[in-house]
Amino acid sequence: MRRIAFVVASSGCVASPPDLHEGPAPLVTPHFELYGAMPSQASWYEAFAVGLEAWRGEPVPTVRLFQNTWPICPSTSCNDDGKVTVVCSAVDDDCLPAIAGALIDHFGVMPLVFRNGLVDVLAGGLGHGDLLDVAIDRAIALPELVDDAEYTRRQATTNALAWAGGVQRPAGDFVRFVVDALGAAGATRALRGGAWGELGSFQLAIERWRAMPPTIGRMYRLPLVECSAERRINLGSTLVPAMAERVQYAPDVVDPMHRVAIGNFQVEAASAITITVTSAIHAPPFFRVESCGGADPGRFVGSYADARGDIITSTMELPAGTYFVVGGSSGGDSSTDPTAADRPENIAITAVKR
């Protein structure tokens, strides 16, 4: 099995290398050995591993993660002791994709176009961002990009925004289509070994995918953590623990999310739902609501500009289904002191059926 360290070098974000045989004690969870992560981030990553196990139907290995810090391993390569190792920068918003990528690689090799598409699916996070919240263009020439050399060549000669809209997101959307059609195990066999099962063939799978209703933004993603049972809130006022910044994957959100609380709720029948978020740090709050699956009512955003002091409230019409709300506030202590986001204050989120 291949184990890859997904390394991101980020100037100013990673400390100078210490003695590789010494260092602080890690924060340990059932699936992680974490260096440089705050407790709320550790909780989020652990919930991701639990969700990934349930989705795959088999255990995932323990991950050694170095976040915003230099690796401390028995060897300089971090590869010779059999552990899955991830080095990432939370400031660059890449830790969840890095973890997903390392675990995908652990279970075997697949073409990069599918591997990176699956990473984007499993990283979860926000589907309706700000920059590319449009219908996905399915004209991508997927058969040409299955060749890793061609994929790499094109990526090197394409600007990042064009690549995201023209390749990364269509590939993720295709992978999600295959997952929905074949299930996790069947999709893995198709994407890794070309066993397309009831889809017939790669080309027939592409044709069926293109005939599907359009996908907007990143709504092909699987919000494994956001929609987990552990984050369920009732319709009513709920105090949700505030979490460290950059814990949720949101690659194209313009406004910073320094401090967030995330919970999901169920709507039994089409209803008007009023969302109210009260900031815990006396800073302008915001919220975003998205579907956990099924019908996509589009993005519903309460921005900082809509806030009145420490409170923001708005009402939306939602079809029956399960949704998650991201509520938070920007500025205050957490904009200059990241550890402030792990203080025990809660953010009050009220979801009320009208």
Image (tube, rainbow, N blue to C red):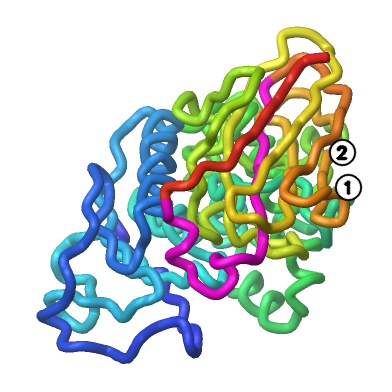
Task: Name the spot of residue 11 as percent of width and height, x first.
Answer: 50, 89
Q: Front-most of 54 and 265?
A: 265
Q: Front-most of 286 and 159?
A: 286
Task: Name the spot of residue 350 as percent of width and height, x first.
Answer: 68, 28
Q: Residue at left 61%, top 36%?
A: 348
Task: Name the spot of residue 267 as percent of width and height, x first.
Answer: 72, 15
User: Quick one: SS at disc 2?
Assistant: loop
The answer to whether the residue labelled 2 contacts the one labelled 1, judged by CB atoms less than 8 Å apart, is yes
Task: Name the spot of residue 341 as percent of width and height, x first.
Answer: 49, 58
Q: Front-most of 236 and 105?
A: 236
Q: Residue at left 18%, top 72%?
A: 24
Can the viewer see residue 11?
Answer: yes
The residue indicated by pointer 1 is 135
Q: Is residue 219 left or right of residue 113?
A: right
The residue type indicated by label 1 comes to Ala
Q: Residues within 10 Å of mark 1 (few under 14, many from 20)?
A: some
Inspect the magenta stretch and tell me whether residue 103 lies in it: no
The residue indicated by pointer 2 is 214
Q: Residue at left 72%, top 31%?
A: 291
Q: Is residue 140 left or right of residue 72?
A: right
Q: Is residue 337 left or right of residue 71?
A: right
User: Quick one: SS at disc 1?
Assistant: loop
Q: Front-most of 152 and 253?
A: 253
How far apart marks 2 and 1 lie (CA) works out to 6 Å
- Range covered by the magenta-colored residues: 322-343
- Whichever of callouts 2 and 1 sits on the residue coming sooner in the sequence is 1
